[in-house]
Image (cartoon, rainbow, N blue to C red):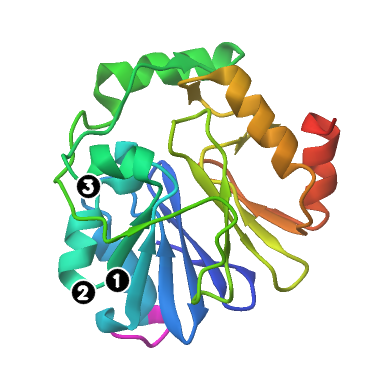
Amino acid sequence: MTMTSIAPGVYAIPVGIVNVFVIDAGDLTVIDTGTPGSAKHILAAAHQLGRPPADIRHILLTHMHADHTGSLKALKEATGATAHMHPADAALTQRGEVMRPARPGPGILRRLLFHLSGLGMFPTRVEAATVEHELQDGQVLPFAGDLQVIYTPGHSQGHVAFLWPHEGGVLFAGDSASNIGRLGPSILYEDYAEGMLSLARVSRLSFDAACFGHGPAIIGNANARFRQQWGQ
């Protein structure tokens, strides 16, 4: 497991097919939890930072899919952290559900990955976990360096991204977009048209780096890349 620095105090942790992120702003905040079995990797990353499990105080979820919520319960039990999520997806997570009807994003690769996901690539259920706090669009969180919540529905009804306002801005895009080979749409969508509207909105924000659930981060002039793709 290799932890990568995105910006001072911001780290990416690759856990198999998905990325998890940690923000060190006094307490530690984790963004997404990976597939089931990923909690040990997140705790190992905290150890690399010289921090005990109890220093992880907050867990933010971009959405309810199993590769993002699969280790939520385990990580909460190991750390005592509270979970934060948009209510539209939190309702499913609290029942251990991970999917609504969805269709693949555009292109052969996305259709292939979508097909593979239906063949057992992702769990169809996860351990149900309590979500203590509901996230709302535009909310500025009183931790993690004043992280801002950006509501970005499309990939899922309750998908959110996060904007960290330091070091030129870091966008945590979740699965609103992907960077598999190159910047583009996500693998699947509940509502593709709504997802494109969300990306058009995100492209108007100011951020120098962008982090994704799938694919490497873009570090340097990332907002220009988004504007080129989805600006209106």
Q: Identify the residue position indicated by label 1 in the image.
A: 43
Q: Do labels 3 and 1 touch, CB within 8 Å?
A: no
Task: Tell me how far mark 3 sits from mark 2, CA to CA.
Answer: 18 Å
Q: Residue at x 26, y 82 (%)?
A: 54
In the picture provided, is 20 more to the left or to the right than 99?
Answer: right
The quadrant in which the C terminus is found is: top right
- Magenta segment range? 48-52
In the picture provided, is 180 more to the left or to the right than 220?
Answer: left
User: Which of the two residues, 127 or 40, is positioned nearer the viewer here?
Assistant: 127
Helix, strand or loop status at disc 1? helix
Please tell me the numbered disc located at residue 80: 2
Q: Identify residue type, mark 2.
A: Gly
- Which of discs 2 and 1 lies nearer the camera? The answer is 2
Q: Residues within 10 Å of mark 1 (few under 14, many from 20)?
A: some
Above/below status of 14 relative to 64:
below
Q: Residue at x 67, y 52 (%)?
A: 210
Quadrant housing residue 66: top left
Above/below status of 196 relative to 221:
above
